[in-house]
Amino acid sequence: MIGVFHPGDSVIHRMPALAKLGLLAVAVTITALLHSLPALGVVALVTVALFALARIPVRLAWRQVAPILWVLALAVPVQWFFAGWEAAATMGARLLLAVALAAVYTLTTTVTATLDAMQVLLRPFARWIDPDRVGLALALAIRCVPLLADLVREVLEARKARGAEGSPTALAVPVIVRTLRTADHLGEALMARGVDD
């Protein structure tokens, strides 16, 4: 879902990563505070316009947003049951828009530019925080989101092949086990390279 850079020369591509990070933070905060479906509709139109301005192909944009639909498929009915359809729709729209806005950022910004921006932001706090370590953590997070999406997709395909499509356990258990195994391998690889020295 996240971490796939789509090269281009649009205004959004050329904007400094630090400025884009700031705008992303503001946009996601505003989206999270909105309680009106019409207002969220305006944010959705702006988000679509940003994808168009960045010249992101529809298929690529869909691939970034589609994985969150699995979360919404579980969360929205629960929210609907406990708080009503409007609260469920608002929650689902907020989450979907936040992911879409983050996708605009990651599709138009290289990981290197993001890490450089984070190090600039953290430099004043270097006495308490190691900017390089935080940059590495951010790079790993960016890389692990699409990796986790791939794991879920592979498990879904395997589950479908075994005819266990209706079982949540057949999805959750293999995803958790494979995620933990991947995390162990990643930790061992980092220690072997002396990252934790």
Image (spheres, rainbow, N blue to C red):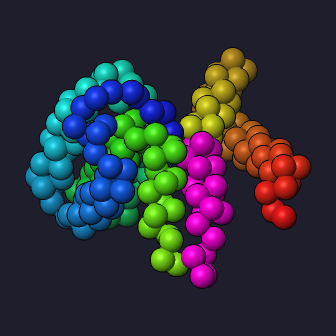
Residue 184 percent across, percent down from the top left: 83, 49
Residue drawn at (29%, 39%) of the image: 14
Residue drawn at (61%, 32%) of the image: 150
Front-most of residues 183 and 191: 191
Judged left or right of residue 126, residue 116 is left
Judged left or right of residue 134, residue 62 is left
Front-most of residues 49 and 131: 131
Q: Is residue 39 above or below residue 57?
A: below
Q: Residue furthest bottom?
A: 127
Residue 114 percent across, percent down from the top left: 46, 50
Quarter-of-image position of residue 35: bottom left
User: The C terminus lies in which quarter of the figure?
Assistant: bottom right
Q: Is residue 144 above or below residue 34?
A: above
Q: Which residues are magenta?
A: 126-145
Q: Is residue 73 visible?
A: no
Number of callouts in the render?
Answer: 0
Residue drawn at (46%, 47%) of the image: 113
Residue drawn at (52%, 53%) of the image: 115
Q: Is residue 115 visible?
A: yes
Magenta part mainly helix, strand or loop?
helix
Front-most of residues 28 and 131: 131
Q: Is residue 64 above or below residue 173?
A: above
Residue 80 percent across, percent down from the top left: 34, 55
Residue 138 among magenta residues = yes
Residue 179 percent across, percent down from the top left: 73, 45
Residue 179 among magenta residues = no
